Image (spheres, rainbow, N blue to C red):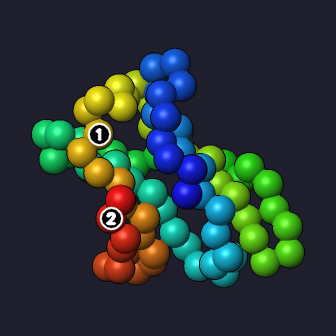
Amino acid sequence: MRCPEQNGSDVVAEISQTMLDHATKLIIIDKDQNTLESIRHEGGKSPGLVRYVHRFKNLNINNVDHLEFQKRPYDYWITF
């Protein structure tokens, strides 16, 4: 994971993963404990590896409490 950073009015994070056949998502829990989902697009691919760019619209990085990377059925997650 490339750490989240401020990009204009948005927070952007990149994740490279080898789980090509599994549905995953990145969410942010803000300081008010709201769950925010990203807009995701593929940022590149090679054999066995894919990079996703996650954009959280109109969010200041100072409002981020933590991030969670979740794998469907979304009851498994890793907290950053």
Q: Amino acid at mark 1?
A: Val
Furthest-right residue in view?
47
Task: Name which residue lies at 48% across and 62% down.
Answer: 25
Disc 2, disc 1: CB below 8 Å?
no
Task: Name which residue lies at 40% across and 48% down.
Answer: 37
- Residue denoted by label 2: 79
Q: Where residue 15 sits: x, y (%)? A: 59, 57
Residue 64 numbered mark, or none: 1
Quick check: 52 above or below 60? below
Q: Where residue 18 sits: x, y (%)? A: 67, 76
Work out how far the residue at label 2 is from the one at label 1, CA to CA, in angstroms. 13 Å
Packing grade of label 2 (10 A; few <14, some 14-19, many >=20) is few
Quick check: 32 above or below 10? below
Q: Tag 2, which secondary structure? A: strand
Q: Amino acid at mark 2?
A: Thr
Task: Name which residue lies at 45% across and 77% down.
Answer: 72
- Which image quarter: residue 52? bottom right
Task: Name which residue lies at 85% across and 67% down.
Answer: 46
